Amino acid sequence: MTDLHKQKQRGEYAKTGAKRVAILDAALEVFAQVGYGAGSLREVAARVGMSEAGLLHHFPTKPALLAAVLDRRDQHSQEWVRMAEGDGDVTLRGLITTAVRNASTPGIVELYCVLSAEATQPGHPARDYFIARYEEARTNLCMAFEDLARQNRTRPGVVPRSAAIATLAMMDGLQVQWLLHPEVVDMAAELADFLTAFVDIDLTISS
Amino acid sequence: MTDLHKQKQRGEYAKTGAKRVAILDAALEVFAQVGYGAGSLREVAARVGMSEAGLLHHFPTKPALLAAVLDRRDQHSQEWVRMAEGDGDVTLRGLITTAVRNASTPGIVELYCVLSAEATQPGHPARDYFIARYEEARTNLCMAFEDLARQNRTRPGVVPRSAAIATLAMMDGLQVQWLLHPEVVDMAAELADFLTAFVDIDLTISS
DNA sequence: GTCTATATGGCGATAGAC
DNA sequence: GTCTATCGCCATATAGAC
């Protein structure tokens, strides 16, 4: 798995790796901008300076390309999982950090905003991905609120499971408004406001 | 404007009215299911039992059809505007009623969910529509929270403008989760929970 | 007012040369 | 590993018959 054997054994892969990454970056842009259904392999190929056939050598079908794009982004945002390990305080603070970072990478926000809406439909190739993703996120957030409840740091009447659903909804909804009115909506600030209405936590924005 | 003159003056319109409505209903379904970009006039025409050319006689272009669909739905949901007239209590209770009604008409929820995400992109034919719509909704909700603040019925630290943004975000975000997991997410209940964290209000679900 | 026919072009995917 | 060429399909939109 190290670089040791790349000369012969996986030399091909090492060489094409850069091209693959370039394709995935371009595909992310395209799908983010017009969605999966309206996005075209032609446009993706054009952005990396390739023919469509060349592109399809790396990713045999359009759904396969989408799956690869989502896979790649998941590796980047596996912080979700790591956050969940125990501390509710850390998890919630991580949410704010994520919001701050998102505000500087509109492409990723667009991708998930457009795709999650599109994938709502039965038969969409990313539907299962998003179903699993939301389920996992709700579970992680629920554990975070339960942790804080155990410390008596949740406001009276807060139900962990509901708070988890609400927090997720909040993040998604803020993204739509932010994409339409970036100068009017401050995602991180609004999210922090929202969270402090549910739990006793210091969320002064760090990062 | 009554039926009196339909015989000659507007006979044509009265006759085509039904067909137009049928087309708009079909278009709403199609755009809701796959979005505007991926939706096709062919599919819409098929659903009303017409040729594509016949459809284009009523709505000359695809963007024109989308505009007509949005226009029509706006007439239905002009409650928004009426709600705004003064009473913050009435406005927020109206939100819950809307959530309850939405849960029984998935088509409308899908339409706005998918379109608002898609319309995020510069150049989308519905972008201006959604920008105006959100701006108006924020203003109305802000007035509602201000009204309640005047009655000392908002929780300490609640800023009307932020509460308005958050409430809108909440409604949008809940819709995505509800479309993916209808059995797990209760839109009206979660929204009520959310609102009672901000204001002193009785939102026991009526209707 | 609706149709058939057609123009024009973009789409995903395949075959086969280099 | 990338290309050219091509297939077959679907898209929006137009022209003109009925």
Image (tube, coloured by chain):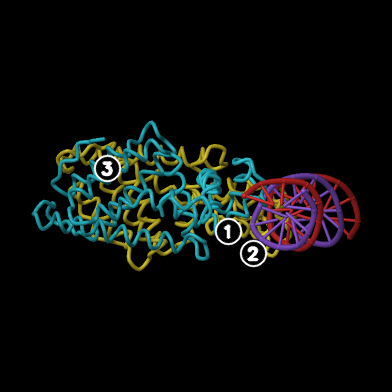
Chain colours: A yellow, B cyan, C red, D purple
Q: Name the disc covering residue A30, or none.
A: 1
| Front-most of residues B99 and B117 | B99
Q: Mark 3 points at which residue?
A: B96
Q: What residue type is labelled 1?
A: Val
Specify the subunit that label 3 lies on.
B
Q: In this view, does B12 lie to the left or right of B100?
A: right
Q: How crowded is mark 1: few (under 14 residues within 10 Å), some or many (20 or more)?
A: many
Q: Name the disc covering residue A47, or none.
A: 2
Measuring from the top left, give residue A148's x and y in whole percent: 22, 41
Specify the subunit that label 2 lies on.
A
Measuring from the top left, give residue B34's x and y in whole percent: 55, 46
| Front-most of residues A47 and B200 | B200
Specify the subunit that label 1 lies on.
A
Residues tagged 3 and 1 counted as in contact (Cβ below 8 A) = no
Q: What residue type is labelled 2?
A: Arg
Q: Do labels 3 and 2 share a chain?
A: no
